[in-house]
Image: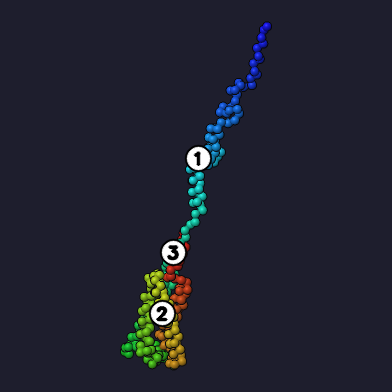
Amino acid sequence: MATRKPAAAARPAGGGSKSRDRGTRGGRPEAGAAAARQQGNRPGSGRPGNGRPGTGQARSAGQAQRGRTAPVAVAAVDEPGPAGPPSWLQWTTWVLSLAGLGVSVYLTIVHYNTAVTLACPATSSINCEKVITSPQSVVFGIPVAVLGLAFYVFLAAANSPRAWRMAWPPIRWARVGSMVAGIVFVLYLIYTELFTIRAICLWCTSVHVITFVLFVLIVFSAAAGYGTAKAVTRA
């Protein structure tokens, strides 16, 4: 009796066992391949995975972020204020100081040298000689003309353009203080001429006017802050 051979098992299309995915067993991914892909997907592994940066890229991004958000150090430093008032004010105060010095020198010479003729009219209301020879022309044993001479010697130096450009506080305060004292003394002299001596000295009046103008200019410069040091903020 003839025997029947068993029919060959039907092979799946694509070549049987070879149709299985390479690197898989029974359709499951091998453990080594899965671990490799998982290791590649971790950030900081040095290899890009799923678009995530590696260790070097993450570190660079962090440094750049810290650089943008780092606070800027700010310190207050002292810098000198304006070098001085405008040129016109410097020269105006200096010229006025020299003019006051010249008049003071002339009045001092006239006070000590009677041979010098005083160029001033002599009327009932204007009489320079009566004023400078009156008892009120000497204060605390010092002639008023000498006090005016010392006052304007100081102002000629303190109001020079070079002194104006100096930011040394003592010069600034000495200038302002001298002008305050000077204007008070001028008011006293004007009162004495009008109500005690009852005569006006034209030379003395010129000094009074110069002193008043200098007082206004110097007080204005002090209020404007010329010659002071100001704190500024610098990054």
Residue 79, quarter of picture = bottom left
Q: Which residue lies furthest to the front in this view?
A: 1
**Could you tell me which residue is drawn at 53 percent across and 42 percent down?**
43
Circles 1 and 3, Cβ within 8 Å, touching? The answer is: no
Kind of residue at disc 3: Val
**Could you tell me which residue is drawn at 64 percent across and 21 percent down?**
12
Residue in the foreground of this view, choosing between 49 and 133: 49
Nearer the observer, disc 1 or disc 3?
Answer: 1
The quadrant in which the N terminus is found is: top right
Looking at the rendered structure, which numbered label has been put on residue 45?
1
Residue on which disc 3 sits: 77
Q: Residues within 10 Å of mark 1 (few under 14, many from 20)?
A: some
**Residue 133 spot, x, y in % from top left:** 37, 91
Kind of residue at disc 1: Ser
C-alpha gap between disc 2 and disc 1:
80 Å
Residue on which disc 2 sits: 178
**Residue 226 spot, x, y in % from top left:** 44, 71
Residue in the foreground of this view, choosing between 62 and 89: 62
Residue 188, quarter of picture = bottom left
**Could you tell me which residue is drawn at 43 percent across and 70 percent down?**
228
Q: Which residue lies furthest to the top in this view?
A: 1
Please, is residue 66 above or below residue 3 in the view? below
Residue in the foreground of this view, choosing between 48 and 69: 48
Nearer the observer, disc 3 or disc 2?
Answer: 3
Q: Residues within 10 Å of mark 2 (few under 14, many from 20)?
A: some
**Could you tell me which residue is drawn at 47 percent across and 63 percent down?**
233
